[in-house]
Image (spheres, rainbow, N blue to C red):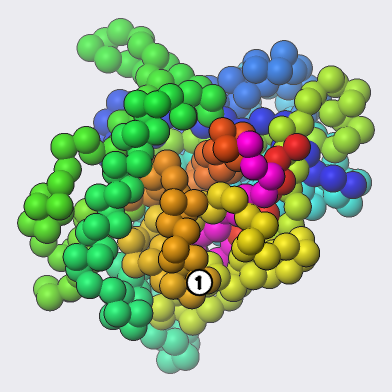
Amino acid sequence: MDALIVDAVRSPIGKRNGSLSGIRGDELAGQVLNALVARHDLDPAEIEDVQMGCVTQVGEQGWNIGRMAPLVAGWPETVCGTTVDRQCGSSMQCNFNAAAAIASGQLDLVVSAGVEMMSRVPMGSNGGDVSDVLLERWQIDPQGIAAEVIADEWGFSREQLDAFSLESHRRAVAAIDEGRFENEIVPVQVSAAGAAVLLGVDETPRRETSAEALAALKPAFLPDGKVTAGNSSQICDGAAAVLVASERAASRLGLGPRARFVSFGLAGVDPHRMLHGNPEACARALERAGLTWDDVAVIEVNEAFASVVLQFVADTGLADRMGDVNPNGGGISLGHPLGATGARVTATLLNELERRDERYGVATMCIGFGQAIAAVVERL
């Protein structure tokens, strides 16, 4: 049974301590959930489950935000909810879970979502010291160090990392100016100067940045390193949601699907370098789909760090297709609200496939401690 993508929406992405920072995560996610069903005049009581990605499940993002957000949204208590943490791949894992439940006939209508308010709930605040037994078996470093290791091992220069980052901002700004995000962003209510206003545009892309400005930034993780705040993903706030349906539910409720999930792939890799698993996850997803890269028109690779995307295109042989990789920018320019990114890139991928009138797209993201996840999407 096909897992149909009826729709995919997201909030605008708020910069660190920006316009979204005054909103709780459950409340922001609730606004996005309500916007998703409103676009289809859908009674939320029809939804059986909400799968919500969230990495930092502590404080306001604790207590199972996947259950709390639908309740905050005013959805009936019959709508179940759970919270998923596969680190940066959390809401892509929610896509995986929703698709699997529908394909197996267990559920008919699921929302796969994600939220992360990094301004309000600091990254890493839900963790502690890692096991001494683990450290005896593996070298575990911060992700920024892993990004440095990849840059060195694959031979990427600081100039290459910065050039990629500058292009990410250029693409994101162009996408905003051309209205490419308008079909995926749902305006959300925020407070400004004591009044409620609607925010409908991403705050994160930097129009004013330049090669010179990026080159002036100091290394963020090693004194003589290449990885800076400018060629890393931005700390930010955001939420996103995908409505996934069985053919039976779509027909009964009059929901016209835009796409379907074809396949998924997972990869486990060395937790020291940790960020280099995207090619393997994609290879597994493509093999399950019976496709090759020649069949894929648009590729979304989460820009956790510039070195991650450059390593991906080097290992997949896609360096001559950079125009198809993150054509509207990515985590460096748009931001990477951890638990929301998988659902966010799903929305962006779907809209770009429609804009280009193409059939297949792939979304992938590396994951902390050495994993990766990928999905193949077919536009209908």
Residue placed furthest toward the top? 195
Residue 264: image quadrant is bottom right
Residue 114: image quadrant is top right
- Mark 1 lies on a secondary structure that is loop
For the point 80% across and 35% down, which residue is it?
245
Q: Position of residue 66 (x, y in %)?
A: 61, 39
How crowded pointer 1 is (Cα within 10 Å; few <14, some 14-19, many 20+) is rated as: few
Residue placed furthest toward the bottom? 136
Q: Position of residue 260 (x, y in %)?
A: 75, 43
Q: Position of residue 162 (x, y in %)?
A: 22, 59
Magenta-tinted stretch: 357-373
Q: Nearer the viewer, residue 132 or 202?
A: 202
- The relative height of residue 222 versus residue 250 in the rendered view (above or below) is below
**Amino acid on which disc 1 is placed:** Gly
Looking at the rendered image, the quarter that the C terminus falls into is top right
Q: Which residue is mark 1?
A: 317
Q: Is residue 248 magenta?
A: no
Residue 119 in sight here = no
User: Relative to 292, is 235 on the left or the right?
Assistant: left
For the point 17% across and 43% down, which residue is it?
209
Q: Position of residue 170 (x, y in %)?
A: 29, 42
Residue 354 in sight here = yes
For the point 39% across and 14% down, which residue is it?
198
